[in-house]
């Protein structure tokens, strides 16, 4: 649990019951008092009882992710992943994959000709998902998810390939 308290930050992961998954919890504090005694010196500090404000799922092999900012490319991707019936673990893998490829930058360009959030090669391939492929994150993510689904099955399978081969 990640607990934020005055003058103190702690971070630990609690094992989830699902195989190879970790859940990270962000907790922000309420008010309690805690006394600490050391070397005959007593310090009383107002602490806060943890209140869970967010939980994060970590999939096997993918870094943990939080809830994306509304309106962001990641939020669009999250909605699309869930609409396909994939879970939060698949979204975590997609975040890791697209972070590696483009950092979710709709204008990311590679000297090889790869372009956009999914780094389509050539970028113009994404026109099959929409005429606004060069500037619209939703179009790029749609194309990327279709590519991932057709070639690998799921974002976690694509992420696994990317980790082993260095590309997807």
Image: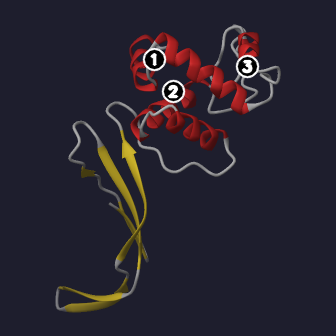
Q: The residue tagged with tag 2: helix, strand or loop?
A: helix
Q: Splitting the image into 4 quarters, where does residue 64 fall?
A: top left
Q: CA distance from mark 1 to mark 2?
A: 7 Å
Residue that label 2 marks:
97
Q: The residue tagged with tag 1: helix, strand or loop?
A: helix
Give yes or no for contact between labels 2 and 3 (Cβ–Cβ under 8 Å): no
Q: Dot 3: within a 10 Å radius of its alpha carbon, few (fewer than 14), some, or many (20 or more) residues? A: some
Name the residue: 71% across, 27% down: 139
Name the residue: 73% across, 19% down: 109
Name the residue: 28% across, 40% down: 21
Q: CA distance from mark 3 to mark 1?
A: 18 Å
Lateral position of residue 65 relative to residue 10, left or right: right
Q: Name the spot of residue 35 as percent of width and height, x first.
A: 25, 89
Q: Which mark is residue 56?
A: none
Q: Splitting the image into 4 quarters, where does residue 62 fall?
A: top left
Mark before the other along the chain sequence, 3 or 1: 3
Q: Name the spot of residue 141 as percent of width and height, x first.
A: 64, 28
The answer to which of 50 and 79 lies nearer the viewer is 79
Q: Which mark is residue 162?
A: 1
Q: Name the spot of residue 66 as percent of width and height, x first.
A: 48, 49
Mark before the other along the chain sequence, 2 or 3: 2
Q: CA distance from mark 2 to mark 3?
A: 16 Å
Give yes or no for contact between labels 1 and 2 (Cβ–Cβ under 8 Å): yes
Residue that label 3 marks:
109
Relative to 14, is 130 above or below?
Answer: above
Relative to 16, is 96 above or below?
Answer: above
Q: Is residue 117 visible?
A: no
State the count of labels. Answer: 3
């Amino acid at each position: 649990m990640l607990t934020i308290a005055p003058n103190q930050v702690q971070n630990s992961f609690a094992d989830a019951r699902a195989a190879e998954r970790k859940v990270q919890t962000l907790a922000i504090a309420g008010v309690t008092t805690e006394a600490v005694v050391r070397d005959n010196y007593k310090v009383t500090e107002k602490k806060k009882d943890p209140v869970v404000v967010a939980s994060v799922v970590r999939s096997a092999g993918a870094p943990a992710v939080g809830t994306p900012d509304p309106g962001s490319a990641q939020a669009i991707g999250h909605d699309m992943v869930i609409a396909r019936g994939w879970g939060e673990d698949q979204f975590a893998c997609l975040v890791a994959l697209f972070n590696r490829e483009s950092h979710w930058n709709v204008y990311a360009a590679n000297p090889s000709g790869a372009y956009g959030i999914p780094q389509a090669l050539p970028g113009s391939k994404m026109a099959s998902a929409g005429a606004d492929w060069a500037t619209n994150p939703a179009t790029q993510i749609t194309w990327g998810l279709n590519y991932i689904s057709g070639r690998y099955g799921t974002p976690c399978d694509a992420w696994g390939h990317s980790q082993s081969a260095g590309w997807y």
